[in-house]
Image (cartoon, helix red, strand yellow):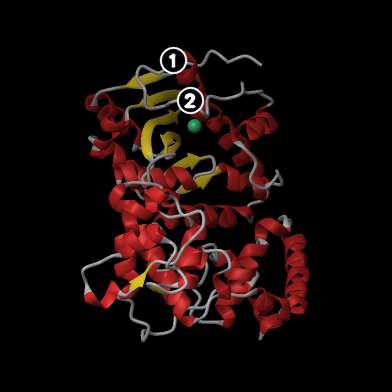
Amino acid sequence: MSIPNLEYKWITTTDELKALSTQWETGGFLCVDTEFHREKTFYPQLALLQVNSDGQNFLIEPDIAKQTPKFLALFSNASITKVFHSASEDCEVLYRALGIKISSLFDTQIAAAYLGSRNGIGYAALVTELTGTELAKGETRSDWMIRPLSNQQEVYAAADVHYLRDIFIAQQKLIQQQPHLIAWIDEDSDATAQRVDDLDNIEDAYLDIKNGWKLNKQQLIRLNALCQWREKIARQSDRPKPFVLRNEVIFELAEKGLVEKGGVEKERADNSRVGDSSKESVSKLSLPFIKGWHPASLRRHGTALLELLAQLDYEQDELTQPLSPEFWQKLTAKMQNIKAAIEQVANQLNIPSDVICSRKLQRQYVAYLLNDKNQKPRGWTKSREQHIGPVIKSVIE
Ligand SMILES: [Zn+2]
């Protein structure tokens, strides 16, 4: 497998990008990809933008993109289709780095699933499947922030949009033969783009913590407070959430709460030192001992967490309970009926059943129907409401 000799052009001035954007805004479609890093930061760092238009590949410096409003406006222009492969992370990166919210998104990974490829198929595999071209194993792990990029990196980056165009064109032909798929693909792509609206919804963060259903009301209030605190600190310090506090530590802190100083925890001198505070209300309390809590995290955040937990209001309204395994156990028979009914719809529409409604989405929708405190899931599109909603409702109600 060799690296093909692709042509590409660097865009390093706003004038060039502005001129190109004027051409691009006349309609049609743009194939887009991004390279970014997020290993050591909360916010993803945009390192490179790639665009293919009419078969021409462009490598765009993020700073130049940021300073070219005409280019940014293309992403909200509904008359131009933006083609991505597996767009969810790109959507987040573009939203964070450039304030972009994408309309008229077409995700080739989503389209591939509807057209019968493996659900979640990777870019290189889809290129091979639809065009026969074998791509060289990538540069995914390389440093995209450095300049200049190596020739190999540049070619790799260009290939990410070059064949995206071929994929899109091939998929358009396939979709023409099954036009009923258009709405499904568009709506799922759209839902992916809309998810950026949830990025800063920190109120539901505690629902993602494993085993949250085991906690009682008080513990759940602590879990919620700790999760919201972590979301804020991660953003303020631009550190990944586990760097601030790991999920296991959050769970155990919520479970145990504060302990009386000099009680069972008195030998844990380290923790009680961190727990010292001049405030009278908290002076008798300290953090519990938690195995595996990194000393650096404890030192940095111990005092703040002690104060946070000491000042919690336990009289607040009851939080949405995370759903327990028992909840689902009671519904086993109904969930099986739902699964069978969905398979029938899937057969009628000639769409794979895990694509038409994944198990996760089935559960989210059932949870929403049974408990109005649960949000209607993002992925519950018009087409699902129309074709699958009645099926699930008739089993549940
Ligand atoms: Zn890429």
| Residue 200 seen in render | no
| Alpha carbon distance from label 2 to label 1 | 10 Å
Disc nearer the start of the sequence (2/1):
2
The answer to whether the residue labelled 2 contacts the one labelled 1, judged by CB atoms less than 8 Å apart, is yes
**Residue at image mark 2:** 142
Q: Going 44% across and 23% down the picture, which residue do you hit? A: 56
**Residue at image mark 1:** 150
Secondary structure beneath label 1: loop
Instruction: Return the x and y of residue 167 as percentages of the image width and height.
Output: 59, 34
Going by the numbered disc 1, the residue's amino acid type is Ser
* Quarter of the rendering occupied by the C terminus: bottom right
Tell me the crowding category of disc 1: few under 14, some 14 to 19, or many 20 or more residues within 10 angstroms, Cα based.
Answer: few
* Residue 331 circle label: none
Q: Does residue 212 sit above or below 27 in this rendering? A: below
Going by the numbered disc 2, the residue's amino acid type is Ser
CB of mark 2 near ligand 1 (< 8 Å): no
Residue 171 position by quadrant = top right
Residue 31 horizontal side relative to residue 147, left or right? right
